Amino acid sequence: MLEIIKTVIKAIPIGLATTFKNIFRKPTTLQYPDVMPDLSPRFRGLHYLARYPDGTERCVCCGLCAAACPANCIYMEPMENEKGERKARIYIINEIRCIFCGYCEEACPEEAIFLGREFEFCKYNIPDFIYDKEMLLGVFDKIEKDRRVREGHKFIRNARFDFRSPVHAMKHPDYKREKTE
């Protein structure tokens, strides 16, 4: 019993010292709904399917994203439209099964699927986490609308594969040229 009292008497000043040491520091807590956290540039969030500037979807339902997915969370069925172009009739992603690895994004030759920066997609029911083609295209429309309002830029991915060209990369505002002197 005496041992316990000694431990408590030693612990209280140590705890108070820690409290007083940290009481005057700048708090690291974010007021989350009001202040959004800074995400890593490589953050992978909610999927979206991209569109061409004319509004048609980019996905040609080649199946490479579904084949590359290690979690097997992508299901698709192809169809041909009246022009003979191949499109996805059914495109479904189960966000609960997804591990957000980005392999689908890397495998897509048409640059149709992306992992966005949206991390607030909480739902109350499990079936609400199954995103179909219209929902994924809707996420793109929301992202594109917000980006146009915020930045006033042209359409995302106006020119195909322009991000792979070193000339375009060097013109990007986030590009930092290493100075050699």
Image (spheres, rainbow, N blue to C red):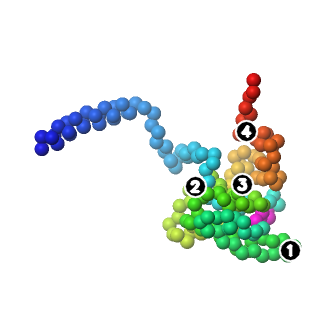
Q: Quadrant of the C terminus?
A: top right
CB atoms of marks 1 and 3 within 8 Å: no
Q: Observer-nearest residue: 106 or 49?
A: 106
In the picture of the structure, the residue carrying the numbered disc 1 is 84
Tell me the quarter of the picture where residue 110 sits: bottom right
Q: Give the mark nearest the N terminus, 1 or 3.
A: 1
What kind of element bears circle 1?
A: loop
In the picture of the structure, the residue carrying the numbered disc 3 is 144
Q: Nearer the viewer, mark 3 or mark 2?
A: 2
Observer able to see residue 30: yes
Could you tell me the amino acid type at mark 1? Answer: Gly
Could you tell me the amino acid type at mark 4? Answer: Tyr
In the picture of the structure, the residue carrying the numbered disc 2 is 119
Q: Give the mark nearest the N terminus, 4 or 2.
A: 2
In the picture of the structure, the residue carrying the numbered disc 4 is 175
In the rendered image of this protein, does residue 141 appear above or below residue 179?
Answer: below
